Amino acid sequence: MSRTSIGRRSTARVLACALVLALLVTLLVVSAPPARAAMTVTVTLDKASYLSGDTATATAIVYRTPGPGNYTYSWRVSVLFGGVLASELNGNSTYRYAIPLDFEGTLVFRVDVHDGTDVESGTRSASVSIAYMSLMLDRADFSPGNTINAFYGVSSRVITNPRYDYEVEDSAGTIVLSGNTTSTSFAFRTPSPASPSYTFRVVASQGSNSTEAQISIFQASGVILGMTFDRPTYAPGETIRVHLSLTPRGTTALPSQFRWFVTLGLAGVVASATTTRPEVDLLITVPQGTGNGDLLLIGQEFNTGGTSIQAVRIGAANPLWSTEIAGMPAFAVLLALLFVLLLIALAVLWRRIGGGRAPGPTQPAGMAPPPPPAPRHAAASPMSVACKNCGKNIDLTTSKRPIEVMCPSCGETQLIT
């Protein structure tokens, strides 16, 4: 048998095997079930937490690939680690649940979404309380001897007519003030010397239901670093005079020596000084080439940690707003002058129209009123003669003769007799 015939048989066998393999793959693809649709379900609530007696609204958001389908929604509301409180089969994408007045805890909202083939679920939980309290103080910190006013209130569908029990504790846990009231505020005057801090606690109650809130306030401490400039605006190359001053707060004591620093924006320009007084004037130059706009100036005192940040204007500014006259802004002075001029103009106008005219002199008794003035006769109409040159009329305003006149039309001068 020749080699050619052997090669042909091998090629035929390879082609036959390939054909059989292609047929098997085709059969597998045709007989395979269709791919399942990918679907995700998310539950959203209209609030993160609720009051007892509120109505919660849950919404199911469905994302499905490929495209949306016909969905049915089955809802269930249960207690966290507890039983089912409510359910709804074959509902809509939005579900509303009226929370009972006696419920307090955590609710779990679950939805099962059916697209006709598959089912996917989503859950969301929210806390429920019978009441929420608000409590605030009228100051952020205090100095010994200050009066602190506390304001509070309760939001509830259960505690609708509360009684408030309040107390104030010092930093050692000793109650320094207590009482009860139906008012929504009380005041506490701090002693001198005073505790470093005080805690205000208020309990609102009605029957067996109650809720509370507390807040702490601390004695003022630290320092305030003030920073002012000698001018409102500067140009590149000009020098800024910065005045820094320290003011202690509360019982804070100042050191005997002060180390001052001023940094101009991001340019890396720094001015510094060391003094024995709690204030200083530092000079810092605006670099050439600085563009117009606001630059930040950062002032610091190293020994106390005081810091102040302000913006300084670089570039031209409206002189009307920046110039001062006798310590007052120029625009304010101009507005005052315009107002005075307007009052004067109104007064003059009022007198002219007769509003401010004084009454005339009265006629003495027994005297006849003066006769009315004699009527004035209208002036006679002007006479006219014809121009000897052009024939146009020349108006005459006098009867004096002879008189020399000039024609307004041709300019010819002639003698009228």
Image (cartoon, grey):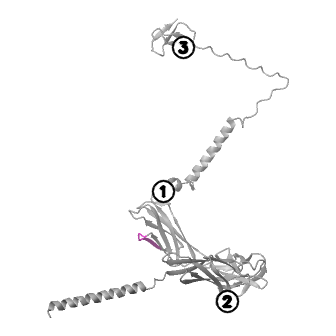
Q: Residue at x 66, y 38 (%)?
A: 349
Toward which corner of the image does residue 30 lie, by quadrant?
bottom left
The residue closer to the viewer here, 391 or 164, is 391
The residue closer to the viewer here, 166 or 391, is 391
| Numbered circle sitting on residue 83 | 2
Where is residue 347? Give x, y as percent. 67, 40
Measured in 3D between alpha carbons, the distance from the residue under mark 3 to the one under mark 1, in whole angstroms, is 66 Å
Give the mark, 2 or 1, whose residue is nearer the N terminus. Answer: 2
Residue range of the region highlighted in magenta in the rendering: 266-273
Q: Residue at x 30, y 86 (%)?
A: 19
Farthest residue in the right direction? 366
**Residue 347 falls left or right of residue 232:** right
Farthest residue in the front direction? 1
| Number of dots carrying numbers | 3
Where is residue 388? Give x, y as percent. 47, 8
Give the mark, 3 or 1, whose residue is nearer the N terminus. Answer: 1
Q: Amino acid at mark 2?
A: Gly
Q: Which residue is mark 1?
A: 317
Q: Amino acid at mark 3?
A: Asp
Where is residue 103? Give x, y as percent. 71, 84
Secondary structure, mark 3, is strand
